Image: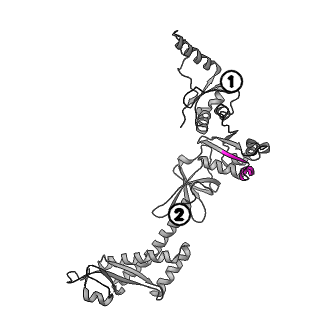
Amino acid sequence: MSSELLNALKMVADERAIEVGELIMAIEQAVAEAASRRLGRENLTSRFDQARGEFDLFETLEVVDAVSSPWAQIAVDEARALDPAAMIGGTVSRKVAMEGLGRIAALSVRQMIHKKGRELEIDHIVAGYRSRIGQVVTGKMMKKLHDDILIDLGEGVEAILPKAEQSALDRFERGRALKLQIVEARAGKREPLVTLSRIRPELLRRLVETETPEIQDGLVEIVAVARDGSGRSKVAMRGKKGGVDPVGAVIGVRGGRIQPVTRELSGEKIDVFAWSDDPKELIASALTPAKGVTVVIPKEGRRAFAIVPDDQLSPAIGKKGVNIKLAVKITGWDVEALSQAEYDEMLKRLKGAESGEPPPPAAPGGEPSGSAAAG
C-alpha cells in the first residue's frame, strides 16, 4: 500500500495545484479519524513517514503511577522506556500497529485523500477570489438558475450573478462574454461560491478607467460614481492638472471612449460631468441632462432646491425619479427639484406665513414630487 498511497498523494497534489506538505497534514488528520472509527479510540494521531512513504499511527497516553484504563494510560516505568523525560501527569506517544485498520480503513483513507484534496483546492480558489473582491473579471453566461445566472469564470470556476445584481438592460445569451465585479467568495459544500454583480458602482469605475488613458496617467480622476439598476448612472470627474478637460477625456472624440463602456453595460445611459467644490455648481451639474438649473441652498443642513424651467422639470427628476435620486447619491445633498412656478408659489406661502396673512391654497396633489433624500 505504501507506493500506492504515496503516488496517490503526489497525483492529487499535482491535480489540485496545492502543496504536498499541506495535503499531507490534512491526510494525517484523515488517517487518524479513520483509525479512530475502526478501533473505537479517540486518542489517536497519525504522522507521515516520507522516507517509507507510509503513515504511522500513534496513541497518546497519560503517564500514571497505577494504570486503570490501558487504552488511555501508561505506567510511569513503561512510559520512561519510550521517553526518559516522562513524568506522572504528562503524556507520551506510542506507535499502534496499522494492521488494525484493515481493508475498509485503507479504502477510507483513499477516499479521504481525494476529499481533503478537493477541500484544499476549494479553499485555495476561495482565498484567491476573496483577495480580488471589488475587481472586474470576464465571464461567460452558461445558463439560468431560476432568476439567477450561472457564469463560467474559466479554470473550472462557476459563479452566480443573482437577480438583485443584474441590470434591467441585460439580455443574457448562452456564451455571451460579460464584465462583472466580484462581490463575495465563500466555500460551499462541493464547490467554491463566487458572487458577481453587474450594477455596482465599482464596475463602472473600472470600465471607465480602462478606456481613459488620462486617468491611468494621473491627469484626471473619478471623484464619485452613482448607479441605478434600471440602467442609468452618473460619473463625476475632476482634472488634476491644468489644460485637461476631465469630461472630454472620459467621453472621447465623438464618444469614442464612453461608447465601449455603454455597450459593455448593455446600453446604460451614463452622465459624465465635472466635479465642483461649490455645492451649487455641483448639484446643477449632477442634474444633467436638465438645463438652466438654479440652485438655492438654505442656511442650515445639506438641503438644496434646484429650480428649473418648466420644460426641464421632467428631465431633472427623470423617469421614476431616477435622475434626481442619482444626483442625491453622487453629491450627498438632499435635493428637491421645483419648476420656477412651484418655487415662486413656495416663496409666496412662506412670506404669507411670516406676515401672518392666510397662505394661498396649495396646488392639487400637495407637495411637489421632485424630491429625494440623501442616503
Instruction: For mark 1, give the secondary structure.
Output: helix
Viewer-side label of 2, 1: 2
Cβ atoms at labels 2 and 1 below 8 Å apart: no
In the picture, measured across the screen, residue 47 lies left or right of residue 208, that is: left
Question: What's the residue at 53%, 79% (across, down)?
Answer: 11
In the picture, measured across the screen, residue 211 lies left or right of residue 117, that is: right
**Residue 182, placed above or below residue 51:** above
**Viewer can see residue 71:** no
Towards the viewer: 217 or 250:
217
| Circle 2: residue type | Ala
Residue 228, image x, y percentages: 59, 41
What scheme was used to colour the molecule? one colour
Question: What's the residue at 64%, 53% (across, down)?
Answer: 179
| Circle 1: residue type | Asp
Mark sitting on residue 127:
2
Mark sitting on residue 311:
1
In the picture, measured across the screen, residue 180 lies left or right of residue 107, that is: right
Which region of the structure is painted magenta?
211-222
